[in-house]
Amino acid sequence: MRDEPRRLLDRVPGLERVELDESESCCGSAGIYSMLRASDSAAIFAPRLEAFVRSGARTLVTANPGCQLQWQSGLERAGVEARVVHVAEVLSGALRT
């Protein structure tokens, strides 16, 4: 079910979707893994963070609430100013305009 959110986002007027390198890789959240093994989780997140910074994107969109929390806290810890939103938030906003 990974293609469906991308197809929906591609239909949002004015939205430019940028695919991260290795976008299917785990962000390190993995349920409660990020709480049980915080340092391992951070090590898994590090290359994802680097890929996001390289992309030049200012917003990260995810369909997974655990990933959303992982990205929000990871970006904040790294001092990266970017928004993290659930795909439903993007689509909801797109429907109102």
Image (cartoon, rainbow, N blue to C red):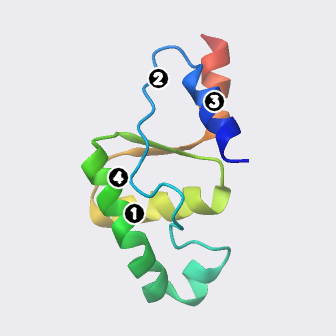
At horizontal 60% and vertical 36% (from top left) the residue drawn is 6
At horizontal 28% and vertical 52% (from top left) the residue drawn is 53
Report helix, strand or loop for mark 1. helix
Q: Which residue is mark 3?
A: 7
For marks 3 and 1 on the same chain, the one whose residue lies earlier in the sequence: 3
At horizontal 42% and vertical 71% (from top left) the residue drawn is 45
For marks 3 and 1, give the CA distance.
22 Å
Residue 48 in percent (x, y) is at 39, 63
What residue type is disc 4 on? Phe
Q: Which residue is mark 1?
A: 48
Report helix, strand or loop for mark 2. loop
Circle 3 packing at 10 Å, graded few (<14), some (14-19), many (20+), is few
User: Marks 3 and 4: which is nearer the front?
Assistant: 3
For marks 3 and 2, give the CA distance.
12 Å
The reply to whether discs 1 and 4 touch (Cβ–Cβ < 8 Å) is: yes
Q: Which residue is mark 2?
A: 15
Residue 70 in percent (x, y) is at 52, 65
Is residue 27 depicted above or below 52 in this figure?
A: below
Toward which corner of the image does residue 12 lie, by quadrant?
top right
Circle 1 packing at 10 Å, graded few (<14), some (14-19), many (20+), is many
Residue 40 in percent (x, y) is at 46, 87
Circle 2 packing at 10 Å, graded few (<14), some (14-19), many (20+), is few
In screen coordinates, is 71 left or right of 78? Answer: right
Is residue 14 depicted above or below 10 in this figure?
A: above
What residue type is disc 2 on? Leu
For marks 2 and 1 on the same chain, the one whose residue lies earlier in the sequence: 2
For marks 4 and 2 on the same chain, the one whose residue lies earlier in the sequence: 2
Q: Which residue is mark 4?
A: 52
